[in-house]
Amino acid sequence: MIRVMNHKGNYESLNLIFMNHIYNDTSYMGNCYLPQRMIDDYSLYLLDSCVMLGQTAPDPEGRGWGSGIVAIHEVGHFLGLEHFDGRRCKKPENERSHADEDYCWNIENTPGLNYMVSPRGSAEGSFTLWQIEQMQNNWMRFRSPDAQSPKMSEKARRRIQHDYTWMHLKPMSFGGQTPTIIVLKEGTDASQGKGQIVSNINACLAVQATIKPTLGPYGGDLLMVDENGRQTITNDGATVMKLLDIVHPAARILVDIARSQDAEVGDGTTSVVVLAGEILKEVREHVEQGVSSQIIIKGLRRASQMAVNKIKEIAVSVADEENHRETLSKLAATAMTSKLIKRNTAFFTKMVVDAVLSLDQDDLNEKLIGIKKIPGGSLTESRFVNGVAFRKTFSYAGFEQQPKSFKNPKIVCLNVELELKAEKDNAEVRVEQVSEYQAIVDAEWQIIYRKLEAVSKTGAKVVLSKLPIGDLATQYFADRDIFCAGRVASDDMERVVQATGATVQSTCSDILAEHLGTCASFEERQIGGERFNFFEGCTEAKTCTLVLRGGAEQFIAEVERSLHDAIMVVKRAVTNRLIVGGGGAAEMEVSAYLHRFADKNIPHKQQAIIKSFAKALEVIPRQLCDNAGFDATDILNKLRVEHRKGRTWAGVDFTDEGVADMMDRFVWEPALVKTNAIQAATEASCLILGVDETIRNEESAKPQAPGQLPPGAAQRALRGRGRGMPRR
């Protein structure tokens, strides 16, 4: 079945298939059919592949079974040579050949050591001259394109291959049990075994190599261009992974852990990908040596749990309320050190901490922090608004006469359309007199005016609606010194409600005083090339807005991503007040602990796995040094010495290019960032190691062409929907 499903090419094509076992017998080294005349027996055509035990695959070392002698031996069969035992040619009983029976002439001059010695061949031998001549003759007689009869097209070959697969599916008995038979769709590629695991690891390492240079305060930024030419400048791990458009199924797991790290804690997205790749790199040697993947997975999970417990043990609690704001500022500053805004850390740190502390401390919904980007100006022109700010919405004629500034205004928020327009639904009204028609028209005007009067009587000076506010309503409000804005975005309306204490109303008839909101000031201002509506001094404020300025749009977008990471770090620090030292200090301490524990308490293979995990943790300080241009080997040796002496928070000192106490330098990170990164990286590694077979359906992977449009659809799509002007 394996031969049939995997045969490629024509009869002259050599197919070498390496398998975990052949005929359920691990002692069977290989099998290859002798050449046949191409008659009508297509089963022989499809079975024409050489299968060999996987451990005999040639390797770079070239020792033992890896020397390739089994493959060479089977290629001899492929070209018509039979076994030679030093005395005569031996034809296998289960094979038949159309080659001449007496081709083993001149046997007395054949050395005993040659590639066709039964059963496995000899690496010290070679093909004799007469064997080489015979292989050339057999090629011309049986396998050359001119010798094949009949010839088949690729389509016919696939059809026969499909039919033969189904014809030969018969129930088989293995120890009294019927095995599960899986027939995959034509074109499906299946890869399995140790080689598949190593291949998946290599794919992940390729992704890791791309993102490693962005780690740390001296990490570089990546300029990424998508298929539409849109440019993104970033060193945010989650953003880079999303924009890489990775197609390898195993490597896409790294995209998922970067996304989950970003959603859960906001920071550490690059670290989690780098750490996952390094864990896989360290255990790859064990995989290649034949250690069971389940043993490796068990060891990694044990090491991960020990690492998390150690971080919780050494973490420092900062529950001091008096210095709470200062602690949050230091955590936010550490999160910004690797970003584009690191030169303005002090400016943005205050903005981030103010934003988080302005939220409801029981909820801490970061979505209520609005971020508005306005190109132009400098970074320091960005501002924190203790309230809401949003772009001026589309407005109708009469808007210019409305006032643009109020002190302590009442605010009404609606989900009502204030616009005079034709009936949307189908309606039929029968009238007998012109006066009756006029009554219908008057009723429409009365309905809209009643709505406007009801809103005006509430005393509100600012009217906001999620739905349109038309020209009639705009002019009506302008005459009464009321500001209005329609088509307000849902998220902006939600933040206005949170800030002013208003309640969104779906009708204008029952608006009460308690439904209105208020703020200290409302003003429409010009910022750069945009006009913004500002609601400031909100007494019920549980939301805020960050207005960002800067040069290029790509730069402002990266500033937004940087602030998001810092906001998430501060948010987690409010609810979880355990911190650890940055600069690779926590990773080095855990690594030293795992090495000591494994040496004393863990025997055999598990010890090697845990020590590999411990070594993988050192990738964080090592990469920090590499990206900063430091001597990574020298600094890592110093860090190992410091941590052996019990100096828990010794980390990479970027100021003096050496080693320093990260707690004293105020390089702090939430412990949650470290524990979540270690757990996510370990689970991703275990998931990749647990996959020893990949099935790829090439047909389904191809982009599907859009379905054919019905006749006339294109013309109807281009045709205008309204009534055309008559020709004159």
Image (cartoon, rainbow, N blue to C red):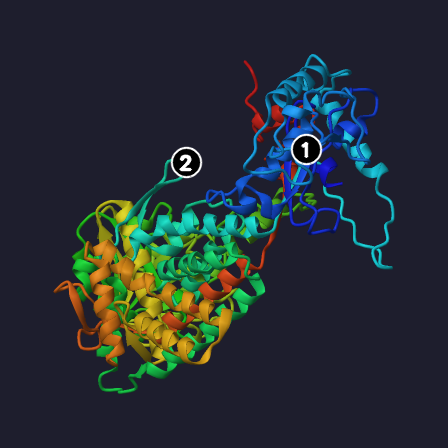
Sort mark 1 into few (<14), some (14-19) or many (20+) by Cα contacts within 10 Å.
some
Secondary element at image label 2: loop
Residue 496 in view (yes/no) = no
1 or 2: mark nearer the eye: 1
Whether residue 656 is visible, yes or no, is: yes
Viewer-side residue, 709 vs 52:
52
Q: Which amino acid does label 2 sit on?
A: Asn
Give neighbour class at mark 2: few <14, some 14-19, many 20+ (Cα, 10 Å). Answer: few
Element type where label 1 sits in the image: loop
**For residue 272, above or below residue 34:** below
Quarter of the image where one finds residue 312: bottom left
Q: Give the amino acid type for the residue marked by disc 1 in the picture.
A: Gly
**Residue for badge 2:** 228
> Between disc 1 and disc 2, whose residue precedes?
1
The residue pinned by badge 1 equals 86
Among the 4 quarters of the image, the one containing residue 629: bottom left
Q: Which residue lies furthest to the front in this view?
A: 108
Q: Position of residue 106 (x, y in %)?
A: 68, 21
Q: Residue furthest left?
A: 656
